[in-house]
Image (cartoon, rainbow, N blue to C red):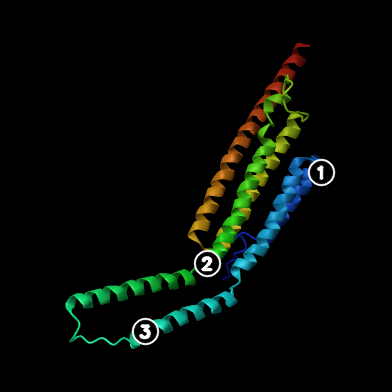
Amino acid sequence: MEVSVIYRRLDSSKTISTINKLKMRIDERFPASGLVKVANELEIIANETNQKLAWIAKPNYLLRITLISIIALILAVLIYSISNMNISLKIISLAELIQLIEAILNDIILISAAIFFLLSLEQRIKRFRALAALDELRALAHVIDMQQLTKDPSRSFKYKPTKSSPDQNLTAYELGRYLDYCSEMLSLTSKVAALFAQHFNDALVLATVNDLENLTTGLSQKIWQKLMIIHRLSEDELLQESVNLKIT
């Protein structure tokens, strides 16, 4: 019996398609708004993520061959040096022998560290690129949060602005849709980040993805608090209207 794994992994193409549909929905309801531009930026980053993941998954054979050649050269020099050492245990003292052994061990440790550094170079280069991409997504999450920062639900209900108050020309329903779009964008931002964790098994990248998911979840919770206020105030207004109708 075959088990389908289609829903066990994130599909980058479907994630990008979802982002594109969200961008079109925002453009249809809030054309020429800043939120459309942010959604477009998220779509661009998601497409770039596909290319970066392909680059990360592809082995860098040129780098590997170069590193293997350097390591082989280091080992060859080490073996040659040891083979040409002319040591006579009869004329060497115990103290000199201990110093010699200590020097050899220090050289072995340094060479081992150098070899480990070279062997992990490809992994670290790919990690650096993945972390740079995750930093972009983290910055974008804060940009999304800025888009909803001044969207106060109370301004849709008998609001009296001051001279320095931001413009508020959205109805309660439009404000609810606007905030909902922000929440969706934050969720999709974390999904794009999760693609790196899915395709690149690195402890630091995984930790960064988890931090980004916690960030977007926290920002979404703030948005949902505003949405709950909108729903509650809307229900209160409907109740008041029904009471007024009964009185009249």
Q: Which residue is labeled 2 in the image?
A: 123
Secondary structure at numbered mark 1: helix
In x, y percent, where is residue 196?
A: 58, 59
Q: Determine which residue is flagged by label 3.
A: 81
Q: CA distance from mark 3 to mark 2?
A: 31 Å
Tell me: residue 32, above or below residue 40: above
Q: Secondary structure at mark 3?
A: helix
Vertical side of 13 occupied by 87: above or below: below
From the top left corner, tell me how far across and down residue 22 is, in percent: 73, 48
Look at 35% across and 74% down and name the residue there.
107
Q: Nearer the viewer, mark 3 or mark 2?
A: 3
Q: Is residue 34 visible?
A: yes
Secondary structure type for disc 2: helix
- For marks 1 and 3, the one nearer the N-term is 1
Rounded to the nearest whole Å, what is the CA distance between mark 2 and mark 1? Answer: 43 Å
Examine the rendering and report whether any part of residue 8 can be seen.
no
The image quadrant where one finds the C terminus is top right
Mark 2: which amino acid? Answer: Gln
Residue kind at label 1, given as amino acid type = Glu
